Amino acid sequence: MKKSELRKLISDYTLLKIKSKNHNVSEKLKEIEHRYYHETGRKLSDDIKLS
Protein backbone atom coordinates (compact mmCIF):
# COMPACT_ATOMS: atom_id res chain seq x y z
CA MET A 1 0.00 0.00 0.00
CA LYS A 2 1.34 3.42 -0.95
CA LYS A 3 1.90 6.20 1.55
CA SER A 4 -0.80 8.24 -0.17
CA GLU A 5 -3.30 5.41 0.39
CA LEU A 6 -2.35 5.24 4.08
CA ARG A 7 -2.82 9.00 4.41
CA LYS A 8 -6.23 8.62 2.74
CA LEU A 9 -7.20 5.94 5.29
CA ILE A 10 -6.13 8.22 8.14
CA SER A 11 -8.08 11.18 6.76
CA ASP A 12 -11.18 9.02 6.19
CA TYR A 13 -10.88 7.72 9.75
CA THR A 14 -10.61 11.19 11.29
CA LEU A 15 -13.55 12.50 9.24
CA LEU A 16 -15.71 9.54 10.24
CA LYS A 17 -14.64 10.00 13.86
CA ILE A 18 -15.97 13.58 13.71
CA LYS A 19 -19.21 12.43 12.08
CA SER A 20 -19.62 9.58 14.55
CA LYS A 21 -21.00 12.04 17.07
CA ASN A 22 -24.00 12.47 14.80
CA HIS A 23 -24.27 9.07 13.11
CA ASN A 24 -23.47 5.46 13.85
CA VAL A 25 -20.39 4.71 11.75
CA SER A 26 -18.63 2.34 14.13
CA GLU A 27 -18.57 -0.55 11.64
CA LYS A 28 -16.86 1.58 9.00
CA LEU A 29 -14.33 2.80 11.59
CA LYS A 30 -13.53 -0.78 12.58
CA GLU A 31 -13.07 -1.72 8.92
CA ILE A 32 -10.58 1.14 8.41
CA GLU A 33 -8.72 0.23 11.63
CA HIS A 34 -8.48 -3.40 10.52
CA ARG A 35 -7.23 -2.49 7.05
CA TYR A 36 -4.61 -0.11 8.48
CA TYR A 37 -3.42 -2.73 10.96
CA HIS A 38 -3.23 -5.36 8.22
CA GLU A 39 -1.12 -3.08 6.01
CA THR A 40 1.22 -1.57 8.62
CA GLY A 41 1.14 -3.81 11.69
CA ARG A 42 0.40 -0.76 13.85
CA LYS A 43 -2.79 0.51 15.43
CA LEU A 44 -4.30 3.49 13.68
CA SER A 45 -5.30 5.21 16.91
CA ASP A 46 -1.67 5.04 18.16
CA ASP A 47 -0.34 6.57 14.95
CA ILE A 48 -2.89 9.38 15.01
CA LYS A 49 -1.87 10.32 18.56
CA LEU A 50 1.76 10.56 17.45
CA SER A 51 1.01 12.92 14.55
Image (cartoon, grey):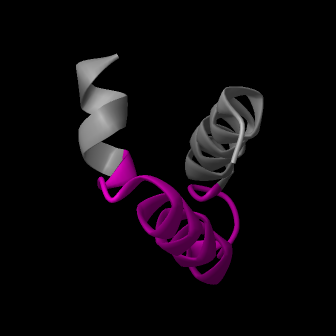
Q: Nearer the viewer, residue 49 or 6?
A: 6
Image quadrant occupied by the C terminus: top left
Q: Residue furthest bottom?
A: 27
Q: Which contiguous range is marked in magenta?
A: 20-44
Horizontal and vertical percent position of residue 14: 58, 39
**Residue furthest out toward the top:** 51
* Image quadrant where residue 10 sits: top right
Determine whether 37 is above or below 1 in the image. Answer: below
Toward the viewer: 35 or 11? Answer: 35
Out of 16 and 34, give the one closest to the viewer.
34
Q: Residue 11: give x, y in percent of width and height.
A: 67, 34
Task: Decide whether residue 29 is among the magenta residues.
Answer: yes
Between 23 and 14, the one lying in front of the other is 14
Query: Which residue is located at x 33 percent, y 59 percent?
Result: 41
Residue in the picture at 67% in, 51% down: 16
Question: Residue 49, relative to residue 21: is it above or below?
Answer: above
Instruction: Tell whether 16 sits left or right of 35.
Output: right
Number of labels in the image equals: 0
Q: Which quarter of the figure has residue 37?
A: bottom left
Q: Position of residue 50 (x, y in %)?
A: 24, 22
x%, y% of residue 1? Answer: 69, 48
Residue drawn where x is 74% and y is 36% of the image: 8
Say if the magenta span includes residue 26: yes
Which secondary structure dominates the residues rendered in magenta? helix
